[in-house]
């Protein structure tokens, strides 16, 4: 069945620009499960022919939905309906590892990467003396080109030679020095996305979000990491395996 047959024609009593009409039709099809996660969309040329619109119009519509995180582009494969990501709370993995394991391409957009002095709150959390050096990493975490989370991480400076050694995976850089966390305490709570984070995540202010607070520990018990990650509520599911201890 053609895409036009699945989601209907454009322009029936709608005065909005054609790219907006196509976006609306695709968005509703995704929300109503007419288009399922990981479904492939037809090539842009075929979509233009089906809806009798230009390829530029199709590209503009798809670009907007990619920015919203509803669609993803995979190099050499095409455009797909984005699948929600399941993050397993029982495994201590980083964002890069999570995305690669799901066949998605991760990358980071740096907000800040710098050296600083521990704050009083961080001093208590990390068990560091007042004024001790730390490294801060502030990033937008993306998968297949779509922003997924805004991450603020503070690492005790003894765990890395400098902030610049972190290019893609923070945990990979920490593993190279023998300071990758082996245990973590995490807390998850629902939040409303702030205007600042909404701009970075390509969502609306006050949309539902998830805040994950993590405190990571080395094998010898020393705390080494504290992070606050704000996830898009429409893109992530957090799961945990529970065992009967009785």
Image (spheres, rainbow, N blue to C red):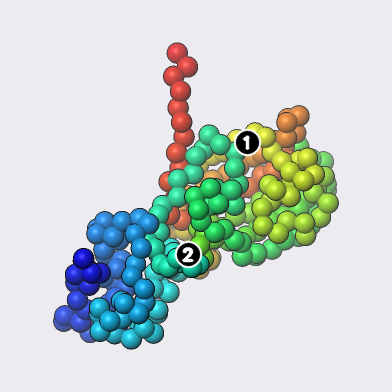
What secondary structure is found at the residue carrying circle 1?
Answer: strand
Q: Position of residue 168 (x, y in %)?
A: 67, 57
Residue located at (25% from left, 69% from top): 3
User: Would you say residue 195 is visible in this rendering?
Assistant: no
In the image, what residue occupies the spot 28% across and 71% down? Answer: 24
Residue situated in front as seen by the camera: 49 or 169: 49
- Crowding around mark 2 (Cα neighbors within 10 Å: few <14, some 14 to 19, many 20+) is some
The quadrant in which the C terminus is found is: top left
First along the sequence among labels 1 and 2: 2
Q: Residue at 50% across / 62% down in the picture?
A: 144
Looking at the image, which residue is at 69% across and 38% down? 181
Query: SS at mark 2?
Result: strand
Residue with the mark numbered 2: 74
x and y, in percent, of residue 155 in the image? 73, 47
Q: Would you say 101 lies left or right of 29 here?
A: right
Q: Is residue 238 left or right of residue 91?
A: left
- Identify the residue position indicated by label 1 in the image: 184
Indicate the quadrant containing the N terminus: top left, top right, bottom left or bottom right.
bottom left
């Amino acid at each position: 069945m053609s895409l036009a047959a699945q989601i209907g024609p454009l322009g029936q009593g709608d005065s909005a620009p054609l790219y907006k009409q196509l976006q609306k039709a695709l968005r509703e099809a995704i929300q109503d499960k007419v288009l399922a996660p990981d479904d492939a969309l037809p090539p842009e040329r075929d979509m233009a022919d089906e809806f009798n619109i230009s390829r530029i119009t199709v590209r503009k519509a798809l670009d907007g939905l990619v920015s919203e995180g509803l669609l993803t582009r995979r190099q050499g494969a095409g455009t797909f309906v984005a699948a929600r990501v399941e993050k397993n709370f029982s495994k201590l993995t980083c964002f890069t590892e999570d995305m690669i394991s799901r066949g998605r391409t991760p990358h980071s957009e740096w907000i800040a990467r710098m050296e600083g002095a521990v704050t009083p709150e961080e001093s208590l959390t990390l068990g560091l003396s007042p004024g001790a050096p730390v490294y801060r990493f502030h990033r937008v975490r993306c998968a297949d080109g779509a922003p997924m989370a805004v991450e603020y991480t503070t690492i005790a400076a003894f765990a890395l030679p400098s902030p610049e050694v972190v290019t893609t995976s923070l945990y990979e850089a920490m593993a190279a020095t023998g300071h990758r966390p082996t245990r973590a305490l995490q807390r998850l709570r629902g939040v409303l996305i702030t205007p600042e984070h909404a701009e970075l995540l390509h969502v609306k202010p006050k949309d539902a979000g998830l805040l994950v607070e993590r405190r990571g520990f080395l094998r010898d018990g020393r705390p080494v990491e504290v992070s606050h990650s704000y996830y898009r509520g429409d893109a992530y599911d957090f799961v945990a395996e529970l065992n009967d201890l009785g």
